[in-house]
Image (cartoon, grey):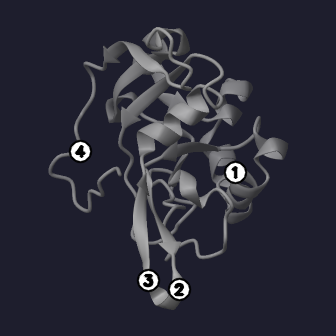
């Protein structure tokens, strides 16, 4: 919790480098670096300037003659799957907000990339269903509302379901809600 209040969420590159400069940040925030983060994460995970977040997504299930249905893949479910390594270990999830633009601009550090938006990011991505929104360098502590610890051992007795239960929540007293800001998009 102290780290949350002190630095917020930071990218792996900053965590590993310990110190970064504005010049280095500008050099790192490129379209190619974002493509590598999205499509080749295993090769760049320790040097990526991006932070993968989820805001949920609507997925279309197609049927014959143009019929189909939309289903929501929730942000919480996606976050839990990652935090618990597909429900194999305990994990932590955060709730917060990041500003996005109506168009992509990787060089603008303050704005996240809404890579879940097929109008902006039309090429097929095998992980589209995760509803990714990609922050750059840091999510400030004032944008993080809470942190929860989820415990796999807190399953109901006799349950064989892969479920985790929230066992602790820390509220961030420094959180500033985005109310009143323009273009707020809701989490699914």
The earlier-in-sequence mark between 2 and 4 is: 2
Which tag is nearer the camera, tag 1 or tag 4?
Answer: 4
Residue depth check, mark 2 versus mark 4: number of the one nearer the observer: 2
**Which of pointers 3 and 1 indicates the residue nearer the eye?**
3
Report x, y in % for residue 184: 26, 57
Provide the residue designation for mark 4. 178
Q: Badge 4 local density, few (<14 within 10 Å), some, or many (20+)?
A: some
Q: Residue at x 58, y 44 (%)?
A: 52
| CA gap, disc 3 and disc 4 | 37 Å
Say which residue label 1 marks: 28
Q: Residue furthest left?
A: 180
Q: Is residue 177 left or right of residue 14?
A: left
Q: CA distance from mark 1 to mark 4?
A: 28 Å
What is the quadrant of residue 5 in the picture?
Answer: top left
Q: Assign the N terminus to one quadrant of the image.
A: top left
Q: Residues within 10 Å of mark 1 (few under 14, many from 20)?
A: many
In the shown orientation, is residue 174 left or right of residue 48?
A: left
Labels 2 & 3 near each other (Cβ < 8 A): yes
Q: Earlier in the sequence, mark 1 or mark 4?
A: 1
> Looking at the image, is mark 3 or mark 1 earlier in the sequence?
1
Q: Could you say whether the residue bearing mark 3 is in a helix, strand or loop?
A: loop
Real-space Cα separation, disc 2 to disc 3, in angstroms: 6 Å
Q: Residue at x 49, y 21 (%)?
A: 164
Which residue carries the number 3 mark?
Answer: 67
Pointer 2 with pointer 1, Cβ within 8 A? no
């Amino acid at each position: 919790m102290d780290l949350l209040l002190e630095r917020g969420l930071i990218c792996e590159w900053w965590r590993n480098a310990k110190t970064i400069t504005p010049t280095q940040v500008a050099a790192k925030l490129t379209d190619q670096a974002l493509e590598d983060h999205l499509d080749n994460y295993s090769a760049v995970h320790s040097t990526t300037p991006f932070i993968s977040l989820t805001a949920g997504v609507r997925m279309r299930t197609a049927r014959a003659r143009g019929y189909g249905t939309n289903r929501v893949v929730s942000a919480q479910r996606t976050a839990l799957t990652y935090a618990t390594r597909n429900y194999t270990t305990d994990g932590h999830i955060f709730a917060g907000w990041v500003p996005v633009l109506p168009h992509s601009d990787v060089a603008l550090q303050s704005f996240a990339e809404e890579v879940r938006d097929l109008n902006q990011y039309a090429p097929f991505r095998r992980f589209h269903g995760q509803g990714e929104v990609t922050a750059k360098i840091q999510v400030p502590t004032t944008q993080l509302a809470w942190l929860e610890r989820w415990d796999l051992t807190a399953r109901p007795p006799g349950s064989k379901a892969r479920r985790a239960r929230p066992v602790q929540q820390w509220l961030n007293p420094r959180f500033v809600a985005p109310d009143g800001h323009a273009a707020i998009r809701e989490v699914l």
